[in-house]
Image (cartoon, helix red, strand yellow):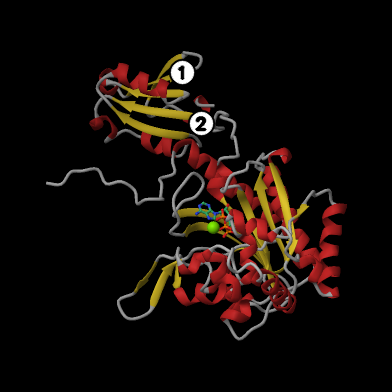
Amino acid sequence: MNNKNIQPVKGTHDIHGEEIKKFNFIVEKFYSLTNKFNFQQVQTPIIEHQDLFTRSVGEHTDIVSKEMYAFTDKGDSTICLRPEATSSIARFAASEYLSGSMKISTHGPMFRRERPQKGRYRQFHQINIENIGEKSPYVDFEMIMVANSLLKEIGVEKKHFRLILNSLGSQADQLNYSKILIDYLSQYRSKLSETSLSRLEKNPMRILDSKDEQDKEILTNAPVISENLSQESTVYFNQVKELLDNNGIDYTIDHKLVRGLDYYTDTAFEFQTNEDKRQNAILAGGRYDKLISLISPRDIPGVGWAAGVERLMSLVNIKNDKEEKLKVLLAVQNDQFLLKSEILKKIYNLNCIHEIKINKNIKKIFSYADKNNFDFILLIGDEENLNNKIVLKNLKTKEQKIFNQSEIKLDHEIR
Ligand code: ATP
Ligand code: MG
């Protein structure tokens, strides 16, 4: 028999104990805040047609070309595990959008076959909002503002993160700028890294994102996009910045912030921790006016962001306050004692956390209650069972009372 332990798949993890508390805390804060801004939750499937991401995220991106979990389904269609949520929401909006602003919130697991390290997993979770249908500096600002408020609400201090901002301009601006960039970079063909060289014709703006030292040096004097934007895009970006200024949200402009995905236009942003490590991006997003037209016959603008829940978890501290509800342990020395007793019904109706424990050894019952922070024990031992009695002990005050099982009023005694 093969009884070797089966480990979780590389890059995946079980979330439990304190970690699951943090996870739920973040997700709950996320939904209560976004509800206030009238975002409506949508849950999209975890499996999608691979085509969705090839067309939206782009086939030359790392996400699609290297990191996708894809397989051929029994028939012939290529299915994948979603690497992100925005494309799925865009697919949904392409068929459901009517008019005005469609504001959507979602959360769930995403899958990317990356090299696992701290803060970088193959299955991780995102919280995500999208605002589809309207293009205005206010809409972009509101997305950033909600992100900023969320970080505050979950207790991430201002000094621990920064907001990085850039404008990628319209599609026409990007075409124009790409030409300028290709001209500049072509002088350094022999010095560029292999990856950057392969991107030079296909996707020159992504070279700005290069981590290669020599590439970085070449890029120091490269023309920047913000100086090559159309008048319209410049005015638009200035208004986003003005709204941020007037609402006390600090930011730093970074001309090299291009984001890893192909579909962004105009406002792009990223919240980073102040630590200088590769996993310092906690929340990222931007405007994507052409995305929906890449996956459907419709042309609808949108803006959105996603935050990595695991990365946020490492920044939050939830106080270990005592749970609000009282914890009651109903212990019996023999499971036969539960058969005819009315106590089960009573305890199920009580607004407390409860657990039923069956153990002959009273000492063990008490030490279990102690270790697990119970407030009360209800005990039916051999003796009590003989005459339909039950012992109630308040573990904090040590006070102990005996009742008839049929007469005890739990909601009166346990408070
Ligand atoms: P990075 O630069 O760290 O690879 P990214 O640009 O690929 O991030 P996005 O696609 O913008 O990330 O996803 C939004 C957020 O999701 C990131 O800011 C990060 O917090 C989180 N995230 C992305 N990839 C992972 C991963 N493999 N493991 C854990 N969290 C992740
Ligand atoms: Mg990445």
In this view of the protein, can residue 280 be seen by the observer? Answer: yes
190 left or right of 152 in image: left
Q: Position of residue 135 (x, y in %)?
A: 76, 72
Write down the residue under mark 1.
395
371 left or right of 272 in image: left
Q: Is residue 315 above or below residue 41?
A: above
Q: Give how far apart the Cα atoms at labels 1 and 2 are.
A: 17 Å
Considering every residue shown, the one lying at the far bottom of the view is 297
Q: Is residue 297 above or below residue 72?
A: below
226 left or right of 399 in image: right
Tell me where residue 314 sits by quadrant: top right
Write down the residue under mark 2.
411
Q: Position of residue 131 (x, y in %)?
A: 69, 67
> Which residue is at a point 56% across and 29% down the rendered structure image?
320
Q: Is residue 119 above or below residue 215?
A: above
Question: Amino acid under label 2?
Answer: Asp
Tell me where residue 366 sits by quadrant: top left
